[in-house]
Amino acid sequence: MPRAILLTVALALVPAIARPAAARPLDAAQVAGGARWMVHVDIDELKRNPVVADVKQRLLQQPQVRTGLDAILALTGFDARQGLHGVTVYGNQFTPNAGVAILDIELDPQRTAAALAANPGYSRLKHGEHVIHRWPENQASSVKSGKTAHAVFYGPRTVVFSHRGQDLRAAIDVLAGAGGNLAANKDRVPARIPEGTILYATAEGLGEALGPQVRSPLFKRAHSLTFTLRQGEQGLDARADIDFLEGSEEIAGNVVLMLGGLQAMARIQLANHPDLQTLIDAVIANKQGSRVLVDASLSNEQLAALVAKAERRIRVPR
């Protein structure tokens, strides 16, 4: 996954936690049908979590945060307090820098394009009726990455990023309906994502992606993975669904036993941390044929306690 994409998402996620807006669930029609992996984050759903809302409120009370957000707004027309609604990242290869990120975001394309054009080495080209903006990554850094970022303002609230021009052009074609999309593949993406889903991720062909250097049957026979994080009635609920190749029932059973052993070791290591032991006990692994299902839950109270502990460790003012 492109590091520039990760940085863009990370910078946007923190300040984007603001007032609730209309939820923006996954739109599988935006994802290429041949995508090997995909991650979708519903920012609007994330904003509804009370612990996240509390963190947002305290962040916005810090003058340096407000100053930074105001500067971004003046430069791009993007109000990071409320302008990011969702992020979808996908790719058809498990290689560094492959893939694209689609942002559901409110900004001013003209002002943002002008800011990008100020980068040394900036250029632009066309793909159909769309203008692709290109600029060297990390211009402000003393260590140049040698990579080039690409972006297109596809339409209202839709911006697409990639490190690779061919990936961006293919993503534009999918958005235009010229390429196959993931909406038709109900095995990869269900017709209806569970209500309250904050993060949905899926990947297939995992064993093939590892290459010949990995010989462990445990990893080589792993076919697909689906992960869901959703807002439940009392807090966050997570599920990981690992599907092994047909005939791998014994491997699936051994994975469940291995996870149980890791839990037991963690309980011993964390004997003096009952709060963390409670979290470990909330993880439940089951086997269904050649599939392993791992469920976990985290109450809002537990999440708030973990956030407070992390803030004390890094000395964040409360």
Image (spheres, rainbow, N blue to C red):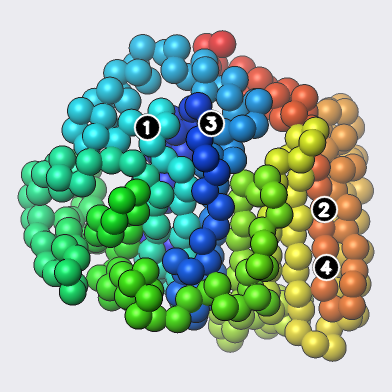
x and y, in percent, of residue 314 in the image = 55, 22
Count of marks overlaid on the render = 4
Q: Name the residue under label 2.
A: 295
In front here: 150 or 87? 87
Q: Give neighbour class at mark 1: few <14, some 14-19, many 20+ (Cα, 10 Å).
A: many
Q: Image check: 62 left or right of 209? A: left
Q: Of callouts 1 and 4, which one flags the residue occurring earlier in the amino acid sequence?
A: 1
Q: Mark 1 points at which residue?
A: 80
Q: Which secondary structure, mark 4?
A: strand
Mark 3 against mark 1, which lies toward the viewer?
A: 3
In front here: 201 or 280? 201
Amino acid type of the residue tagged 2 in the rendering: Asp
x and y, in percent, of residue 124 in the image = 11, 62
Amino acid type of the residue tagged 3 in the rendering: Pro
For marks 3 and 2, give the CA distance. Answer: 27 Å
x and y, in percent, of residue 103 in the image = 39, 51
Mark 1 against mark 4, which lies toward the viewer?
A: 1
Q: Mark 4 points at which residue?
A: 292
Mark 1 against mark 2, which lies toward the viewer?
A: 1
Q: Of callouts 4 and 3, which one flags the residue occurring earlier in the amino acid sequence?
A: 3
For marks 2 and 4, give the CA distance. Answer: 10 Å
Instruction: Name the residue: 20% across, 28% down.
Output: 74
Q: Of callouts 3 and 2, which one flags the residue occurring earlier in the amino acid sequence?
A: 3
Do the residues bearing badges 4 and 3 touch, measured as CB atoms within 8 Å?
A: no
For marks 1 and 2, give the CA distance. Answer: 33 Å
Q: Name the residue under label 3.
A: 20
Amino acid type of the residue tagged 4 in the rendering: Val
Q: Which secondary structure, mark 1?
A: loop
Q: Which secondary structure, mark 2?
A: strand
For marks 4 and 3, give the CA distance. Answer: 35 Å
Q: Of callouts 1 and 2, which one flags the residue occurring earlier in the amino acid sequence?
A: 1
